[in-house]
Every structure is written in C-alpha cells, then in structure tokens.
Image (tube, grey):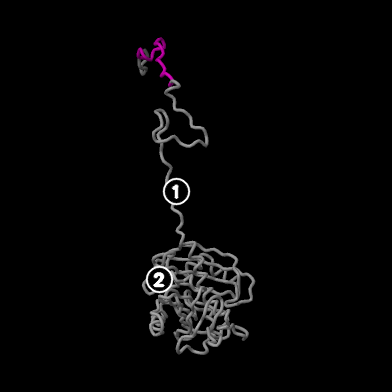
C-alpha cells in the first residue's frame, strides 16, 4: 500500500453490504397537512398534529381619547368662536395687522388667569383650558351690548368687565409657542363657563356662558393641577412635522395653541395641540377651509396624535 494512503475499513469496503435505510413513517405516523385557510388544531389535537401555539395578541387599540381629543380641541375653538357669532368680537376693518401686541407664553399668564378666576363671582372656578391665538389682524371687542342668547348659549358680562378690548395681532417675529392673545376657560360645578382674556398686558374675566354649546368641555380637569411643558416645545415639534410649511403656504391663516386639562377622554397629563386654520378667525360667513393639527401629551411633550390636515366648516 503506497505511503500516505489509509486502509479502508471493512465497513468502507466496496464489498460491504449497504446500510439499511431508515424506514419512512407510516401514514398513521405522518403529520397530517392542515388545508390552507383552515383553523389551527385545538390544544387537545390528536397525537401527530403540530402543537397548538396561540397567535400573538393583537396590538392594543389606540385609546379612544386620541380620537376624542381631535374633536374636543376643535370644540374649544368653537366655544370661543360662539362669541364672534354674537358679534362680541369683530375683525379689524383697518388694512394690515391693525394693533400688534406683545406676545407671551402660557406660563407667563396662568397665574394672572388664576387670580382673575378666584376674583370672579359665581364659581368657584376651575381653569380647564387655555387657547393662545396668533392673529394676523387685530380684533376689536368685547362689545358687552352684544352679549346675550345665541348658538344654544346665554352669555353675560362679568362684573367689572371692560366695555372695549382689542385682541391684538401677534408680531411676525414672535417666539415659537407664544401668542399675543390668550383666552383661559374656567368651569364651575354647574357647568357654567368663564372666559378670561390675557392681552395687551391685562388679564381680565369678561364673560360667563351657560347652555348646550359649552357642555362638551365639562369633562376636563384643572390645568393648574398639571405641569405642562412650555408651548415652545410642542411648537418646535409641530414645525418639524410641517406646521411652519403649512402656515407659510397659507398666508393669513391663524395659528393657535390649545391646552386642555385631564379627563376621562384625555391623557392624565392633559393635552397640548397646535392648530392652524385657513378659516378667517371668528368668521361666520360659512364656507370651508383646511385645518392642520398635531396633539401632544402636555406633561411630556410626546406626540399622541400625529400631524394631519382636514377640511373644516368655517
């Protein structure tokens, strides 16, 4: 045998008989096929069937409050717009922006709004919402003589309410998250709504509304009991999602920041929303426009409803 060659074993020898093949399973032992579309066998399936493995649980449904918030944030604007329908506020007739006022943050005005609420008869009042309005043209009001019944509500001026106030336009270079007009919304145990205006360096309670048109905001809790992130945080996030582009492509649109307190349909930390509407703010002329909206957990700044735009009635 030449060097380097190993000797074949008897098992490897060509003369060795072939090894016995493993027998195929009998039909009784074979794993039966499950027809396509048939339900999986039960956990107690007979031997030979594949073990039943339950499918993974489906992802939890998005909380219904996410859908509800889309509605109630718009309701917050509608509640304010009801005053325009009564003629309490009127758009400036002057060309251009009219009166331009200093812009402020929610955090700068909340303490003054709380003081105004505590000093208003009725109540006690709980602040449940705030709306920062970036007007491109100033609005005059309130005209207390226009307060009365309308839109399913009855409005009365508060004691000592000013007869004339101007809702100023916001400077074009205002910081993100600020506004020259903030309207705070208070509730009492009877469901009455208190309107508090922060503008031109003054914070004043000016009207109380009662009736069905404000019933949709009765579920919200106190904004004084939460610690919301600064509106500049959610404004910057909204800009990254396209708010700035939308606003620039719709000159004259109105940007609003809406804060609502916690409630059965709202996150425990409250909700911030950024809204931009192409409808003329306070207009009662009808027609349709487009609204851009994104919503955030007020306590963390995290997105809860991603940016979206939809058609709305003006």
Q: Secondary structure at mark 1?
A: loop
Could you tell me which quadrant the C terminus lies in?
A: bottom right
Mark 2 vs 1, N-terminal side: 1
Magenta stretch contains residue 18: yes
- The spot of residue 297 in percent (x, y) is 43, 65
Residue 107 place in picture, x, y as percent = 41, 77
Q: Residues within 10 Å of mark 1 (few under 14, many from 20)?
A: few
Q: Is residue 35 left or right of residue 314?
A: left
Q: Which mark is residue 231?
A: none
In-front residue for pair 282/15: 282
Say whether marks 2 and 1 touch (CB < 8 Å): no
Q: Which residues are magenta?
A: 8-25
Residue visible at 54% across and 73% down? 78
Q: Report the Cα–Cα distance between label 2 and label 1.
A: 32 Å
- Residue toward you, 88 or 245: 88
Counting from the top left corner in percent of width and height, residue 222 is at 39, 73
| Quadrant of the snapshot with the N terminus | top left
Name the residue at 60% across, 76% down. 280
Disc number placed over residue 58 in the picture, else none = 1
Question: Which image quarter: residue 300?
Answer: bottom left
* Secondary structure type for disc 2: loop
Q: Residues within 10 Å of mark 2 (few under 14, many from 20)?
A: many
Q: Is residue 94 above or below residue 248?
A: below
> What kind of secondary structure does the magenta stretch mostly adopt?
loop
Relative vertical location of residue 110 with respect to residue 295 in this rendering, above or below: below
**Closer to us: mark 2 or mark 1?**
2
User: In the image shown, does 102 or 306 lie closer to the viewer?
Assistant: 306
Q: Which residue is mark 2?
A: 221
Count up the numbered dots.
2
State the image coordinates of residue 89 (x, y, percent, origin top left): 56, 83
Q: Is residue 151 magenta?
A: no
């Amino acid at each position: 045998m030449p060097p380097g060659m190993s000797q074949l074993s008897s098992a490897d020898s060509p003369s060795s008989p072939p090894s016995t093949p493993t027998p195929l399973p009998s039909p009784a032992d074979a794993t039966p096929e499950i027809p396509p579309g048939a339900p999986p066998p039960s956990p107690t399936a007979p031997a030979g069937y594949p073990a039943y493995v339950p499918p993974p649980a489906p992802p939890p449904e998005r909380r219904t409050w996410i859908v509800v918030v889309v509605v109630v944030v718009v309701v917050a604007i509608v509640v304010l717009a009801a005053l325009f329908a009564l003629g309490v506020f009127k758009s400036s007739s002057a060309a251009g922006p009219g009166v331009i006022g200093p812009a402020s943050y929610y955090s700068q005005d909340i303490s003054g709004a709380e003081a105004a609420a505590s000093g208003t008869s009725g109540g006690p009042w709980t602040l449940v919402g705030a709306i920062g309005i970036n007007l491109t043209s100033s609005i005059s009001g309130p005209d207390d003589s226009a307060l009365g019944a309308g839109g399913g509500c009855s409005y009365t001026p508060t004691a000592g309410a000013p007869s004339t106030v101007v809702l100023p336009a916001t400077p074009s270079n205002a910081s993100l998250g600020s506004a020259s007009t903030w309207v705070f919304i208070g509730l009492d145990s009877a469901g009455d709504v208190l309107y508090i205006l922060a503008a031109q360096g003054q914070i004043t309670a000016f009207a109380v509304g009662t009736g069905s048109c404000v019933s949709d905001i009765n579920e919200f809790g106190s904004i004084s009991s939460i610690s919301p992130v600064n509106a500049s945080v959610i404004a910057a996030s909204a800009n990254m999602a396209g708010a700035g582009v939308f606003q620039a492509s719709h000159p004259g649109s109105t940007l609003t920041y809406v804060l609502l307190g916690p409630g059965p349909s709202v996150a425990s930390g409250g909700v911030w929303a950024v809204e931009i509407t192409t409808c003329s703010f306070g207009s009662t002329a009808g027609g349709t426009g487009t609204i851009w909206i994104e919503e955030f957990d007020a306590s963390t700044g995290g997105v809860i409803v991603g940016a979206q735009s939809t058609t709305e009635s003006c």
